[in-house]
Image (spheres, grey):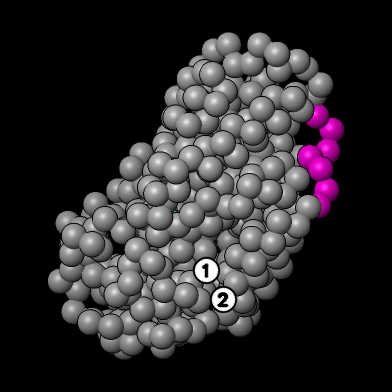
Amino acid sequence: MTRTSGYRAAVRMLAAIGAVALAAACSGNGGTTGGTTGTGQAGGYPDQNITFVVPFSAGGPTDTVTRMIADPMAAKLGGKIVVQNVEGAGGTVGAGEVARAKPDGYTVLMHHIGMSTAPALYQNLGYKPLEDFETVGLVTEVPMTIVARKDFPPATLQDLVTYVKANAGKVTLANAGIGAASHLCGLLFQTAAGVKLQEVPYEGTGPALTDLVGGQVDFMCDQTTNTSGQIAAGEVKAYAVTTPERVKSLPDVPTTAEAGLPDLKVSVWHGLYVPKGTPQDVVQKLSEALKAALADQKVIDQMAKLGTAPVPAENATPQAHRAKLEEQLRTWAKVIADAGVKAS
Ligand code: ASP
């Protein structure tokens, strides 16, 4: 990654974007449609297993959300969904694989905010989000937490800032690769704290959290869907949640604003994609199944336990998802260009 002098000012803008992204996801505004699609028949669909590709490690936050909705979606579709982890390069390896898959509805990608940041970060991405995918629907928007190994000395977020500044050469910050949510949130933290730290990339925050619990890395910024269990069990130390309001399932964890870093605001939207050219009626079937899964009380309860919630039904549609993706691509292209951040 390279940074220019404009880096700090530009990344400070991320705070505002987090709030904007959240508002847009909840607004249910429509937008353009998915463009040209195939027109095949969904009558017999599905008549074989559907693969849901997760572009991060098993056991991490994206994997967790995917597995939550897979069974109720399969029940609605009357088929079987198999989850496959294709990790690497901040989620871009798995996304690329789905972009090149047969557009028949049997290969589906779960991805997050990284879908909108990667084109600006990677020079040879090998896929274009708007041209190579059909959007199926938004899934959830997840708050993040700043967590550390439990014996890490700082007690509060303010202490953390002071500590990392004094120990910048020694402190390690884990993430799931360039463009991952943990990477973006880590950039926000470093900007807010005015420090440059040694980043340790993993193929997902599942293994990063294992190392955090084991004390191999010092701290990271990660989604509540991954960190809630370890926070509750006291296996990691939680400094703050990155949302304007406290997270119901983590009532004792202050917001970044309460803890003294009001600019550090970000949450992570997720959506389902299929390769461009997938028949429109198949996309619709998937979207209906997604809506059914998100209305399933078991899914709602599981998400609530992990600090998140399904998007409103009107956002689990190809149109709302496409509008969100378009808006986020524009937003991040500017922020990242201004910041001069690149994948090396
Ligand atoms: N979503 C990633 C994962 O599932 C983590 C990240 O984006 O930071 O591991």
N-terminal of the two: label 1 or label 2?
Answer: 2
Residue at 19% over, 73% down: 152
Magenta range is 31-37
Residue 215, quarter of picture: bottom left
Q: Amino acid at mark 1?
A: Val
Q: Amino acid at mark 2?
A: Ala
Residue 235: % across, % down: 18, 61
Give the Cα distance between marks 1 and 2: 6 Å
Foreground residue, 207 or 301? 301
Residue 233, quarter of picture: bottom left
* Neighbourhood count class around disc 1 (C-alpha, 10 Å): few under 14, some 14–19, many 20 upward: many
Where disc 2 sits, the SS reads helix
Residue 1: % across, % down: 52, 63
Above or below, 155 against 104 in this view is below
Residue 251: % across, % down: 33, 72
Residue at 43% over, 64% down: 144
Q: Which residue is mark 1?
A: 266
Residue at 56% over, 47% down: 139
Question: Per the image, is 148 magenta?
Answer: no
User: For residue 15, which numbered disc appears in the image?
Assistant: 2
Foreground residue, 330 or 69? 69
Residue 183: % across, % down: 46, 62
Where disc 1 sits, the SS reads loop
Residue at 48% over, 54% down: 309
| Whether residue 229 can be seen here | yes
